[in-house]
Image (cartoon, rainbow, N blue to C red):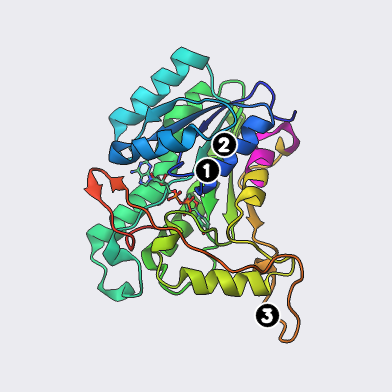
Amino acid sequence: MKLEGRRLLITGVLTKRSIAFAAAREAQLAGAEVVLTGFGRTRRMTERAAARLPEPVDVLELDVNSEGDLAALASELERRWGRVDGALHAIAFAPEDAIGGDFLATPYESAATAFRTSAYSMAALARHLAPLMEDGGSIVGLDFDASVAWPSYDWMGVSKAALEAVSRYLARELGPRGVRVNLVSAGPVSSPAAGGIPGFEGLAREWEGSAPLGWDSRDPTPVAGAICFLFSEWSRAISGELIHVDGGAHAIGAPDQGRTSSSGASQARTANSRGTNGGTELSETQLI
Ligand SMILES: NC(=O)c1ccc[n+]([C@@H]2O[C@H](COP(=O)([O-])OP(=O)(O)OC[C@H]3O[C@@H](n4cnc5c(N)ncnc54)[C@H](O)[C@@H]3O)[C@@H](O)[C@H]2O)c1
């Protein structure tokens, strides 16, 4: 098994529809030992999802914006494992007025919150975990292609552009210590958070029809597979990279009228959920 003996921290599991849940499941099936994080009032949801993984896992507290939580997480991981081989950053958040179509009206504070939680946080996590990766390690984040502007994605899209730059700078900083840093740019996945993005369903439907390989927005397993590859020895010379796992959609300028993909193309469904961020209750339209 390709991840036998690897000790992985997986953030961002909210429900079993979270991309991070699929990553944790695939990593366990490949032999990895996994710990999850959750925070605040949604931690119980993470614990419920954790119970559905192939192997039982612990859920540690982490609000990624809290230096105290980050420090406590790192010392707990050091206590139980002595080292960490890999970490998945699957965290994003934007306040309601930073996403949804009124880009110019977003106040600075809301844009800054989106940036802090969704982009800066990868560096904060790396700062605390890199000292536990003395034998080398792999940090993986999740992106939604930020090379273009999307409807509704607004300051979350800007934050993803920042995340792409953050991962390159982390790759530069941490490479000499044997730590690799990469992003997986996923096609639309019907996760809890995606259900809160206005127009997500339409985008997912279009993607499913136009991606050359087809795309099933209800199935995060292909994304999880790429994450596990980046945790594995097979990707040992890859860092500062952005791997598109989107059915090939990023390579296509416009859909080929009259030709639809035969392999994917099922209707997207969306999921709604409630969660917290720094103690603030979220509505379905505030998410990523
Ligand atoms: N769903 C998609 O279509 C899609 C596509 C590309 C990339 N992504 C990215 O994948 C990642 C995971 O999202 P998802 O779609 O699985 O949704 P999700 O709602 O399952 O995951 C988002 C996670 O962020 C966590 N989070 C938010 N604020 C936090 C904080 N302050 N501290 C710690 N955790 C916090 C939430 O608890 C949740 O677990 C995100 O980075 C997202 O932008 C999603």
Query: Residue placed at 60% from the left, 31% from the top?
Result: 54
| Residue depth check, mark 2 versus mark 3: number of the one nearer the observer | 2
Farthest bottom residue in view: 258
* Residue 8 position in % (x across, y down): 56, 29
- The magenta stretch spans which residues? 226-234
Q: Which residue is mark 2?
A: 24
Amino acid, disc 3:
Pro
Residue 31 or residue 68, whichever sits in front: 31
Binning the other alpha carbons within 10 Å of mark 1 as few (below 14), some (14 to 19) or many (20 upward) gives many
- Residue 148, visible in the rendered structure: no
Task: Classify 160 as above or below 136.
Answer: below
Q: Which residue is mark 3?
A: 255
Q: Which residue is mark 1?
A: 20
Q: Secondary structure at mark 1?
A: helix
- The yes-or-no answer for disc 1 within 8 Å of ligand 1 is yes
Binning the other alpha carbons within 10 Å of mark 3 as few (below 14), some (14 to 19) or many (20 upward) gives some
Amino acid, disc 1:
Ala
Amino acid, disc 2:
Ala
Q: Locate residue 237 relative to residue 17 in the image: left or right.
A: right
Task: Confirm or deny contact between disc 1 and disc 2 (CB under 8 A).
Answer: yes
Q: Which quadrant of the figure has residue 204?
A: bottom right
Task: Classify 268 as above or below 288.
Answer: below
* Residue 96 position in % (x across, y down): 28, 63
